[in-house]
Amino acid sequence: MEIKGIHIAKCHCGAVELELSMPNGLEDPRRCSCSMCRKRGAIAASVLLENLKIIKGEDNLTLYQFNTKTAKHYFCKTCGIYTHHQRRSNPHQFAINIACLDGVNPYDLEPVKIYDGLNHPKDTINL
């Protein structure tokens, strides 16, 4: 699957739209085993902070943080879809929900590596 250049990502209802600059395509597609990611089930890929622009619905995003409160997880207030989060492993990056990318079927990416978020080195509090 070839995804390079500028790409649009949307939540399910379309209230939130992101413009992503992905010159290297899908970088580091992965699932994570942390308590949050296990429950949401998304495949994520990384983009630099400056390569993600919210072009619609910034006021329709809600923020969720837990445990160390380092990562910032964003969801559409209307449909509840997770669109992206600022990573705790690398705060200079966002992780994007690959399923939100227009024209991308996340099932075409299998197999996807699993990142051990359950034993994250930056954790100081266990849930």
Image: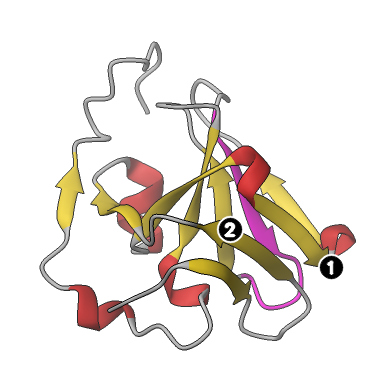
Mark 2: few, some, or many residues within 10 Å (few <14, many ≥20)?
some
| Badge 1 element | loop
Magenta residue span: 71-80
Residue situated in front as seen by the camera: 98 or 73: 98
> Measured along the vertical axis of the image, is residue 88 above or below residue 97?
above
| Badge 2 element | strand
The residue indicated by pointer 1 is 57
Return the x and y of residue 41 as percentages of the image width and height: 33, 64
Task: Identify the coloring.
Answer: secondary structure
Left/right of residue 72 with respect to residue 13 in the rendered view:
left
Return the x and y of residue 97 as percentages of the image width and height: 47, 63
Residue beneath the point at 78% across and 78% down = 15
Residue beneath the point at 16% across and 61% down = 112
Looking at the rendered image, the quarter that the C terminus falls into is: top left
Name the front one of labels 1 and 2: 2
The amino acid beneath tag 1 is: Gly
Return the x and y of residue 42 as percentages of the image width and height: 37, 64
Q: Quadrant of residue 82?
A: bottom right
